[in-house]
Amino acid sequence: MVTILESEYDGLEMRSYSNLSIIQGLVEETEELCHLHDHITRVIADLDIDAEWFADYDDPDRTKFDLSAVVHMLLYQHAREFSQSELARRLRGAAYIYLRFGLSQPLSQQVISYNWRERFTAAERRTIKEAAARIREICSDHDIISTDEPVLAPDEVDATEIADNHIMNAVETARDRGLDEFDSGRASNATFDDVVFFERQGYLNIADRGTTTRSKGSNKRFERISDRKETPHGDTHLRTMKKTAAPPEQTTLDEYEDGRRPADWRRIRDEVLGPFHRGVETILEEVRENGGIREPVIAAIDITPWPVFTSPYKSDEDVTRDDESVVVNGEERYPQEEYPEMVHGLTEKHKHGTRWRR
């Protein structure tokens, strides 16, 4: 049994018995949970928080997030010795820390600061800090503190409750991890930043409305769940998405290294791959910081066909004596040397294209 002695608070102002009893209860429960869990985050998430401990919090005019969820979050912050900015980053990270604590969404640094300063008294803030310090000490003794975060198991999330707020949480995570690597090439004084369009496109894709940007229902749903005061018109959205990662119409001399105009597919590829690779690297960095990928892993692969209308075979007038032929469907054909390697036959007969796997 771990006991808190009055002597531990020598030099500090007097605490009330209720504050000491709160800390004592959390200390005892932490000691028990350390024998059940292998990570400090799981221990903190499993602590029982009594609603009566923080009487000033549940003001109906001020309360937006559940009391126990916020206390778990703050205990986690101070036990891990994180700043508010680092806490905000962890909450929206790949390990979905906010779900583990029972929060409906990741909190921004500003919201965290407001909850800490305005919704807890000085005595309550002191209680949280001191309890977190004791939790950290006990977890350290049990060697269950590490820099990574435990992966949220599939059975910890109820898939039947996926709603718009979950979709927006995913969209905001994608926005912070890689969407800002893409550029639509619009003027710098445009009314809306590119990321506004990417947010809505992300929502439309996840909500299976990727081709309905003109739909009033889709636009209204996005406007309702977005935290932005204004969102762009559907037509503006379509024009912007068509410009995103599209190569400029004006070519450069460097593109004519072989003396011919570069193929459109090659220019599009070169324009897209840069931001795509940077976005992927940002996501991988987040995974590395949170302990990597652990089994079991659920992955989704999306295969998108992109038709290519140029034939992979030379016309009769382009065939030379040195060309090597291949037999295709019983016919002798001569492949083009410059034909893109990624292009192959699609499901439909006599059609060719690229398949993008994501």
Image: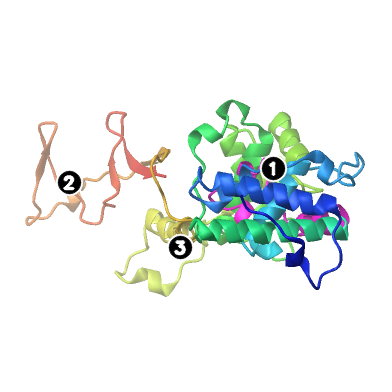
Residue 79: % across, % down: 64, 59
Examine the image and state in which quarter residue 125 appears: bottom right
The residue range painted magenta reads 90-119
Residue 118 visible in the shown view = yes
Q: Quick one: SS at disc 3? A: helix
The one nearer the camera, 194 or 56, is 56
Which residue, given by chain and number where applicable, does mark 3 sit on? 274
Q: Specify the amino acid type for callout 2.
A: Asp
Cα gap from disc 3 to disc 2, whole angstroms: 38 Å
Residue 162: x, y in percent? 61, 31
Residue underneath mark 2: 316
Q: Nearer the viewer, residue 185 or 147?
A: 147
Question: Which is more N-terminal, label 2 or label 1?
Answer: 1
- N-term mark: 1 or 3: 1
Q: Amino acid at mark 1?
A: Leu
Q: CA distance from mark 1 to mark 2?
A: 67 Å
Image-based side of 156 in relation to 264, left or right: right
Residue identifier under label 1: 103
Q: Secondary structure at mark 2?
A: helix
Decide: is 56 above or below 136. above
